[in-house]
Amino acid sequence: MPETRCETTLQAPPERIWELLSDLNLYAEWNPLFVRAEGALQKGGELGLTVQLPSIPPFVIKPRVLSADSQSGFQWRHAMTTSLLMSWTYGISLEEPGPQGVTVVQSSRFGGLLGPLFGFALASSVERGMKEFNRALARWGEKGNVRCLRC
């Protein structure tokens, strides 16, 4: 199944972007793609995410974290009943383009027997959602102080 990718370069230290991405409690404040999130962003952890794709009613998934590292980003996979039937793998990687910036690369791939159907049906909406996510991440990540969101 083809992968949908979306990237943006932010003028912010990678540590600040990771702080924003890894604090799931803040997602409701800034994240238009995952409007509610709970769980531990650590390898093997289970997340509870409410996904808000453009033009699609919100839905809840419970993905398992495959990897999470402040230097490289994270990846999770959600399976419908079993990965053989349908899975959604989503990840964010952090790449440093320079001393004061970071490139954030999102990737999304649907797999399993029903993966091509879900991928085809959701491709446009997933891509638009990822672009909205990037705009929000730039707005909050470049702002300066993630702690202000916690106040």
Image (cartoon, rainbow, N blue to C red):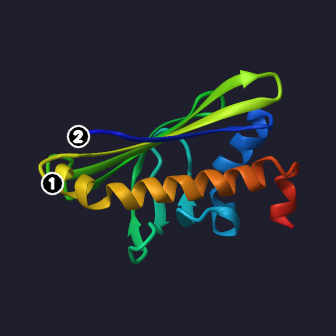
What type is the residue that disc 1 sits on? Answer: Leu
Q: Which mark is residue 114?
A: 1
Quarter of the image containing the C terminus?
bottom right
Mark before the other along the chain sequence, 1 or 2: 2
Residue 62 visible, this orientation:
no
Residue for point 77% across, 55% down: 140
Residue 13: x and y in percent read: 80, 34
Residue for point 83% across, 29% down: 100
Q: Is residue 26 above or below residue 46?
A: below
Residue marked by disc 2: 1
Residue closest to the eye, 114 or 98? 98
Q: Is residue 34 left or right of residue 96?
A: left
What type is the residue that disc 2 sits on? Answer: Met
Q: Is residue 135 left or right of residue 47?
A: right
Residue for point 75% across, 55% down: 139
Mark 1–mark 2 Cα distance, whole angstroms, equals 10 Å
Q: Is residue 78 above or below residue 67?
A: below
**Direction left: furthest residue:** 113
Residue for point 58% across, 65% down: 32
Q: Residues within 10 Å of mark 2 (few under 14, many from 20)?
A: few
Dot 2: element: loop
